[in-house]
Image (cartoon, rainbow, N blue to C red):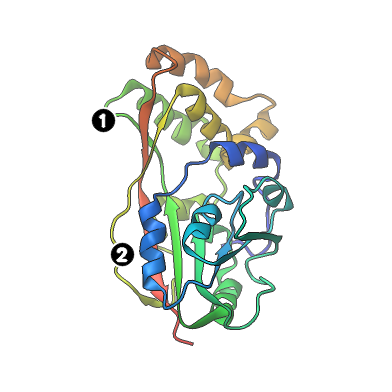
């Protein structure tokens, strides 16, 4: 939990927008069904809008905020999404004005002692809050040579450059407080079919990769690319990439 905002993605906003995975539509359908109304949702820490666009399919209005102006500048436009630069702790939304608060892959960056009161303030009585994260990816089946290279890159090559908050993603937010009446949630699968170029683009969107490059003066993904292409084979052939998705959902009883 960070007390002050550190923009780990300012230099990666364009890469982030083009390379991050999208979430399963069933997740947003399920969340909408938990809400008494579908008038307005706050997507807090929207990044470049990976969740906001899908929320726009099931809610009348989406207010999508991020403290990073660079991220908002790269956000995917949508007729129902209002993108704004704002910190998680000061949304600018009216009291009791939203049916759902969503935090997708961002809760670990927030000052939770300030964010949770803000979420309670803007939620309607009985409103829903949902936070999720996706952990370390896997490529193909167990024992896949490409997956072995990716795991080594994650843990050993750029591993020392992950911000401390990354720990909470690896532990599926189990160590973060979530002071709401919990709702049981089903398991949702996060996966994509990617070529090597798409996978390498995703690795470049990591905060650890950017910090490595700033400290060492070269792109570690470029070095990985040679071995990864050799292990992959046909570069036009897509492989399944999967991530564990961890979801916490609660009801606000203000």
- Sequence-earlier tag: 2 or 1: 1
Residue contact between numbered discs 2 and 1, judged by CB atoms under 8 Å: no
- Whether residue 177 is visible here, answered yes or no, is no
Q: Work out whether 48 lies above or below 15.
A: below
Q: Which residue is rendered at x = 52% and y = 41% of the image?
A: 20
Q: Which mark is residue 142?
A: 1
Give the residue at the far left of this rendering: 142
Viewer-side residue, 37 vs 7: 37
Picture coordinates of residue 220 (x, y %)?
58, 25
Label 1's element? Answer: loop
Within 10 Å of disc 2 (Cα), the crowding (few <14, some 14-19, many 20+) is: some
Name the side, left or right, on which 154 lies relative to 65: left
The answer to whether residue 142 of the structure is visible from this angle is yes
Residue depicted at x 55% and y 43%: 162
Q: How crowded is the residue under tag 1: few (<14 C-alpha within 10 Å), some, or many (20+)? A: few
Q: Residue at x 29, y 69 (%)?
A: 184
- Compare residues 73 and 223 and report the one nearer the observer: 73
Q: Judge whether 222 appears above or below 150 on screen.
A: above
Q: Position of residue 230 (x, y in %)?
A: 42, 12
Q: Nearer the viewer, residue 217 or 61?
A: 61
Give the residue at mark 2: 185
Q: Pick out the residue farthest to the bottom.
A: 254
Cα distance in 3D space between marks 2 and 1: 27 Å
């Amino acid at each position: 939990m960070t007390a002050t905002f550190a923009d780990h993605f300012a230099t990666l906003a364009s890469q982030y927008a083009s390379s991050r995975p999208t979430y399963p539509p069933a997740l947003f359908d399920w969340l909408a069904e938990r809400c008494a109304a579908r008038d307005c949702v706050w997507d807090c820490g929207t990044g470049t809008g990976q969740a906001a666009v899908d929320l726009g399919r099931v809610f009348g209005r989406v207010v999508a905020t991020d403290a990073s102006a660079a991220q908002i500048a790269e956000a995917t436009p949508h007729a129902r999404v209002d993108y704004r630069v704002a910190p998680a702790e000061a949304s600018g939304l009216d009291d009791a004005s939203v049916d759902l608060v969503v935090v997708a892959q961002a809760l670990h960056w927030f000052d939770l002692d300030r964010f949770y009161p803000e979420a309670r303030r803007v939620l309607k009585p009985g409103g829903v809050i949902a936070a999720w994260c996706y952990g370390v990816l896997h490529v193909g089946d167990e024992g896949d040579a490409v997956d072995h290279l990716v795991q080594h890159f994650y843990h050993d090559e750029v591993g020392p450059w992950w911000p401390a908050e990354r720990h909470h993603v690896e532990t599926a937010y189990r160590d973060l407080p979530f002071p709401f009446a919990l709702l049981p949630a089903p398991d949702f699968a996060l996966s994509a079919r990617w070529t090597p170029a798409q996978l390498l683009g995703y690795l470049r969107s990591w905060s650890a990769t950017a910090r490595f490059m700033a400290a060492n003066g070269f792109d570690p993904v470029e070095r990985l690319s040679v071995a990864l292409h050799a292990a992959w084979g046909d570069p036009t052939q897509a492989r399944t990439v999967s991530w564990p998705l961890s979801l916490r959902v609660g009801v606000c009883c203000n």
